[in-house]
Image (cartoon, rainbow, N blue to C red):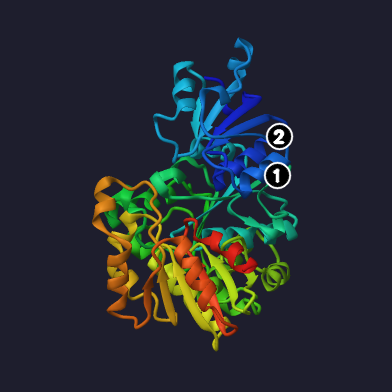
Amino acid sequence: MNSFLSFDKFHLLGIGGIGLSALAQILQAQGRTVSGSDESESEITQALKKKGIKIFIGHSEKNLPLSNVKCQMSIAVIYSLAIPRDNPELKLARKLKLPLFSYPQALGELTKEKFTIAVCGTHGKSTTTAMLAKILIEGNLNPSVVIGTKVNDLGGTNARVADSNYLLIEACEYKEAFLNYQPNLIVVTNLEPDHLDYYKTPQKYYQAFVKFFRKLGPTGQLVIFNQAVLELLKLTPLSEVWEAEPFLTKLPSLQVPGAHNRENAAVAYAAARALNVPDSVIQAVLANFTGTWRRFESLGKTSKGAIIYSDYGHHPTAVRATLSAAREKYPDQKIICVFQPHQYNRTHYFLEEYAHAFFQADQVIIPNIYAARDTKQDLASISPEKLVKSIQKHHPNVLYGNGLENTLQVLQKTNGPNDLILLMGAGDVYKLGEKLVKD
């Protein structure tokens, strides 16, 4: 097979995903012809269209750019891990024996060409990567960046292309994706079990991180918050280790609230110092950092004066952290948390943790559960009503929203000037924000 970077045309399946869309922009900036398909249109696919990338909505064999035999010899297909095996474009690509790369494999090929800084962990990857990206840019390291959210400091996008030797990536652990990467510096935000639809047990989840950390040789660098990470993994790394906790005392006043964001900032600070960025640059960037897309993002107000925020948090720990941040920033507001759990499997596994996660909210509304990669067994294991009953054991004001549309109607009728409406989840609950702002 030809090497990845020898191809001049790429077709991306699931191009509207946050990872593939970033990769599409990098490949295009390198002068390659890029096209792709996704099952539905989104802000991301619209933005890619504006950049001149050909986008197909819906999957079909006709989408593959196969005008002639010569073209077939020069095109590679990259697919998201969410693309099913029976996808018609993927099936045709296999039939024609076109070069195939999963998204992690493709990104892994890019990491071989650069000094790669990989940000991993259970929570806070996107925010920490965004903070570190801006620090490295201002510190004149001029990195290329692949990140799992849109960032204002990157021009409102999720990728940056530069001609330096530095590549900063957000390294996702789902399906051991990050084991495809060749890092020189690994940044760890925090660790606790997640993605158990794939890993099945916490031990297997942690073992994936052990494998990833061992990809660092003696010349590599590992940034952790404190020694608890290594104790949890029972790991003695070969590489140089930087601890971020002492940098908490060097942080400026942050514009992003919450203890979790202070920890994210400390980890970014330690990583930047490992790369010899001066304290003055780091502190100036962190003081001016205003956040990213769907990470406690302010959306505006309703016509009645209620404040609206959107947040991607979907793990019980992330729910607690974001609600604590909201209470820290708005101590006197009535916080209405509209939480859409992501995956039936995750909701079932963490049911008891979710039951205790909402103590900082004045009201909790569960509109539905967002299905993603769930089996029939997963779908039968839990329901929104069961989750509501579980939370009600520990919270006096919990409502089943009975779908997004009905939840919207409830919010439109009942919101007031002292309310903060927090739309939380990794699914499509954020879409209520635009409708509430326009009500």
Q: Residue at x 60, y 40 (%)?
A: 23
Q: Position of residue 337 (x, y in %)?
A: 46, 73
Cα–Cα span, label 1 and label 2: 8 Å
Vertical placement of residue 100 versus 21, above or below: above
> Can you identify the residue that label 2 sits on?
30
311 left or right of 290?
left
Q: Amino acid at mark 2?
A: Gln
Q: Residue at x 39, y 29 (%)?
A: 86
429 left or right of 271?
left
Q: How many marks?
A: 2
Viewer-nearest residue: 212 or 129: 129
Q: Amino acid at mark 1?
A: Val
Q: Position of residue 160 (x, y in %)?
A: 69, 48
Question: Residue 127's quadrant in the figure?
Answer: bottom right
Residue 230 in sight from this viewpoint: yes
Question: Mark 2: few, some, or many residues within 10 Å (few <14, many ≥20)?
Answer: some
Q: Are marks 1 and 2 in contact (CB under 8 Å)?
A: yes
Q: Position of residue 314 (x, y in %)?
A: 43, 62
Vertical placement of residue 400 versus 65, above or below: below
> Can you identify the residue that label 1 sits on?
161
Secondary element under disc 1, as helix, strand or loop, is: loop
Q: Residue at x 72, y 36 (%)?
A: 52
Question: Residue 291's quadrant in the figure?
Answer: bottom right
Viewer-nearest residue: 89 or 184: 89
Viewer-nearest residue: 86 or 221: 86
Secondary element under disc 2, as helix, strand or loop, is: loop
> Which of pointers 1 and 2 lies earlier in the amino acid sequence?
2
Identity of the residue furthest to the bottom in this view: 332
